[in-house]
Image (tube, helix red, strand yellow):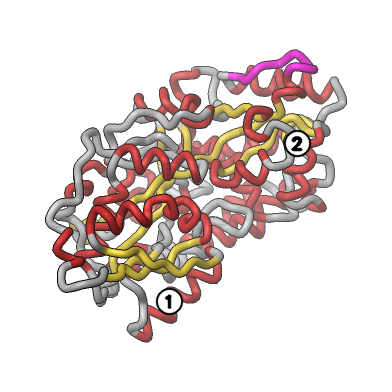
């Protein structure tokens, strides 16, 4: 999955380096007249977040960051073409997981440079290292993280007299109270199939990844599967409960993600699950923007201490054939400064990934702070699946649960069949 956005996945303050450090030894890059360019291929969102740093980077290091920005799906295609033709820039936005432009396939084929010896590499959280590591080496810089959370219309919550729940039972009670008040409890736009991942992935963080840290190794070894795993069965059973009780958008297959956001902004619906980097699009429809929207981590059990949050990083990598590898490494080091990392995360509705930082000064950062402090976060499940086929099977089957066109066992079996392709 590229990122869990409405363009197709495919969202936090996990933290950055505890101590800021200057980018030393780079000023000589400007000697002899003029700056040396660091070329890059990144997303539009990354470009907007990085833009305030460009002048400072040049002043501090003598290098000039010169990116080309692209929509994420188009970027994946561009990157593969450029890698194959030997025309890729110095810095590239690599995807997570096992897709064609994923960091691990690119590393295995020799298209990326080793970044293990960089100062920030030791600050990558343990739960993320498997996403960036191959052959015992680190192959990407994690710029920030995106989380999947439940966002809610504060005015609707106040009007109906409910508050953010901390247990699954409380969540169901909130949903029923909202339904009794003629509100759609949870907006779902399953006409955008990728939206079907949001609630299951939130539940899976607590019910699967946290309980079974080695489940991916088990699945690769064939000792368990989606059908056999009790956690995945519970995930889908709870998602189906919301559907069966009428707690989601009626006829959700005929509604898009944009439509679900409009339902929430208008007050017709109270809550919507989103990747945090999608939240600015939601805020834009409210009079007071983010101030009108609350956020909470979806609980999966009746013990608040068992709640985990799915958080996955956005990545930059160094082209193995970069013309300016030193400048690219200087760019990663410049970004890892705690203040810059926090500023970038705030601008992109995400959070810093590297350990050691304080929370970003937003409601998102405040809500996530205790989960990060307690290490109660896991990567999105699909980022550790062995192929992209499994996610595609999710898109094709999970939305049909809402219409009754498919059963949970058949969804799980379809995921297993896709996963078995390897």
Residue 108 seen in the figure: no
| Boundaries of the magenta span | 158-165
Q: Quadrant of residue 42?
A: bottom left
- Left/right of residue 249 with respect to residue 228 in the rendered view: right
Secondary structure beneath label 1: helix
Q: Residue furthest right?
A: 182
Residue that mark 2 sits on: 264
Are the residues flagged by discs 2 and 1 in contact, CB closer than 8 Å?
no
Q: Nearer the viewer, residue 266 or 204?
A: 266
Badge 2 or badge 1: first in the primary sequence: 1
The residue at the far bottom in this view is 85
In the drawing, does residue 366 fall left or right of residue 40?
Answer: right
* Residue with the mark numbered 1: 80
Residue 82 position, x and y percent, is: 40, 80
- Residue density around tag 2, few if under 14, some if 14–19, many if 20 or more, within 10 Å: many
Measure how far apart labels 2 and 1 are at the Cα level.
38 Å
* Quadrant position of the C terminus in the picture: bottom left
Q: Is 263 displayed left or right of 166 in the figure?
A: right
Dominant secondary-structure state across the stretch colored magenta? loop
């Amino acid at each position: 999955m590229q990122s869990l956005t409405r363009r197709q996945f495919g969202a936090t303050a996990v933290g950055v380096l505890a101590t800021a450090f200057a980018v030393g030894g780079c000023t000589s890059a400007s000697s002899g007249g003029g700056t040396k360019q660091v070329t890059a291929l990144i997303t539009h969102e990354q470009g907007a977040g990085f833009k305030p740093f460009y002048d400072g980077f040049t002043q501090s290091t003598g290098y000039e960051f010169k990116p080309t920005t692209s929509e994420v799906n188009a970027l994946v295609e561009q990157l593969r073409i450029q890698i194959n033709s030997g025309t890729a820039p110095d810095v590239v936005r690599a995807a997570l997981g096992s897709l064609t432009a994923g960091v691990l396939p690119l590393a295995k084929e020799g298209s990326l440079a080793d970044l293990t010896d960089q100062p920030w590499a030791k600050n990558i959280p343990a739960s993320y290292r498997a996403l960036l590591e191959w052959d015992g080496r680190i192959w990407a810089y994690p710029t920030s993280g995106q989380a999947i959370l439940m966002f809610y219309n504060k005015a609707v919550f106040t009007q109906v007299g409910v508050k953010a729940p901390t247990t699954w039972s409380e969540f169901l009670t909130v949903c029923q109270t909202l339904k009794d008040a003629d509100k759609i409890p949870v907006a779902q736009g399953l006409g955008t199939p990728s939206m079907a991942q949001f609630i299951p992935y939130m539940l899976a963080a607590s019910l699967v990844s946290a309980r079974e840290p080695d489940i991916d190794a088990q699945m690769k070894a064939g000792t368990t599967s989606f059908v056999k795993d009790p956690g995945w069965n519970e995930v889908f059973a709870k998602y189906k409960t919301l559907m069966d009780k009428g707690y989601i958008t009626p006829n959700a297959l005929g509604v898009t993600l944009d439509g679900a956001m409009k339902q929430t902004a208008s007050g017709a619906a109270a809550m919507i699950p989103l990747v945090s980097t999608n939240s600015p699009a939601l805020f834009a429809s409210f009079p007071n923007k983010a101030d009108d929207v609350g956020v909470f981590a979806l609980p999966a059990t009746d013990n608040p201490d068992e709640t985990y949050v799915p958080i996955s990083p956005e990545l930059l990598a160094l082209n193995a054939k970069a013309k300016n590898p030193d400048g690219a490494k200087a760019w990663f080091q410049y970004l890892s400064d705690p203040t810059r990392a926090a500023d970038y995360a705030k601008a992109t509705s995400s959070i810093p990934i590297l350990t050691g930082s304080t929370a970003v000064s937003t409601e998102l950062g405040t809500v996530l702070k205790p989960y990060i402090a307690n290490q109660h976060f896991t990567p999105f499940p699909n980022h550790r699946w062995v192929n992209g086929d499994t996610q595609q099977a999710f898109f094709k089957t999970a939305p049909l649960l809402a219409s009754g066109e498919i059963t949970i066992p058949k969804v799980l079996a379809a995921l297993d069949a896709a996963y078995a392709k390897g």
